[in-house]
Amino acid sequence: MDKLLALKMFVETVRCGGYSSAARKLGLSTSSVTRQVAGLESELGASLLNRTTRNTSVTLAGQAYFDKAVAILEAIDEADASVADRGSEAQGYLRASVPVEFGRRIIAPHLGRLLERHPGLEISLSLSDRVSDLISERIDVSVRLGSSVVSDDIVSKKIGDFQRWVVASPDYLARTGLPRQPSDLLQHQCLRFDYGGVHQDWTFQGDENPQRLGVQGRLQSNNADILREAALAGGGVALLADWLVRDDVGQGRLTRVLEQYEVNPGTASTCINALYLPNHRGSSRINVFIEFLEEILAA
């Protein structure tokens, strides 16, 4: 019995919910799939599947075996990809994690061009504003805005810069008055990003020493576009990335205030970084993705 082939057939049978469906997906006969899975059960001395005339379900032992089999098959695929990934042409599966709105607004409009350039590349793009665990989540490359690397075991490559702007709607400023110095914001409703329950001051850097303000407000969110929409609706003052609100400011829907200051939450930087594991150095997949990001950020 070809053990690797039998594992593939068993995994597809569980995923497809039956031998016939698995056989169609694999391009094999139903009898071949049935025979291989039966041989696997015979070798193990355990039933992996429950069979009835109407459906096929996995047993308790089969579920445990399925999880291990999936991990084995993924490891083999990854090993194959790691060899092919050192070639001149990017090919294989790339798992990338990027911030939600950055992915939607900055990356998504250009993905078609990336895929056209590299026909052998497959991309799984995950949108998340939290810091991904590259190892446990099996992420090849993660893009972070202004966050520092938390481990010496992660490679960080700077791919661009951005600014954070303090903005509010003209209606809100007409009601409350224009803040002319950072301390004025203590009298305003500030729309704050939720960093997982950790309060972040806003740091203002001008000609003098940095000023850190413990701003307050009745709305916080872990999604930047929620804060943008609240600011557009006159809900308060927001600290948002320039790429997110540039059009709104240009068209007068939002007004930028305190422009003479560089403003960041806490000690956060204004770097855009690509993070990946050291064993992925030289990866063609990661290199072309990073080059693609540098290209669109430069533009």
Image: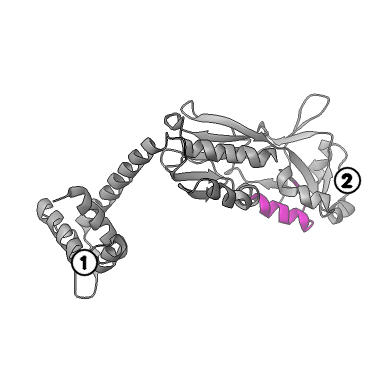
Residue range highlighted in magenta = 223-238
Q: In the depicted view, which residue is nearer to us: 165 or 43?
A: 43
Residue type, mark 1 in image: Thr
Q: Is residue 129 magenta?
A: no
- For disc 1, the neighbor class at 10 Å (few under 14, some 14 to 19, many from 20) is some
In this view, 33 is above or below 250: below
Give me the disc on residue 30.
1
Residue drawn where x is 65% and y is 35% of the image: 160
Does 98 sit left or right of 35 as displayed?
right
Q: In the depicted view, which residue is nearer to us: 183 or 288?
A: 288
Residue drawn where x is 26% and y is 61% of the image: 13
| Quarter of the image that includes the C terminus | top right
Residue type, mark 2 in image: Leu
Reading the chain from its start, which is encountered first: label 2 or label 1?
1
- For disc 2, the neighbor class at 10 Å (few under 14, some 14 to 19, many from 20) is some
Does 211 sit left or right of 100 as displayed?
right
Pinpoint residue 67: horizontal percent, then vertical percent: 28, 51
Q: Is residue 225 magenta?
A: yes
Give me the disc on residue 253.
none
Pinpoint residue 31: horizontal percent, then vertical percent: 17, 66
Q: Which residue is mark 2?
A: 178
Q: Is residue 237 visible?
A: no
Does 259 sit left or right of 276 as displayed?
right
In what element is the residue under mark 1?
helix
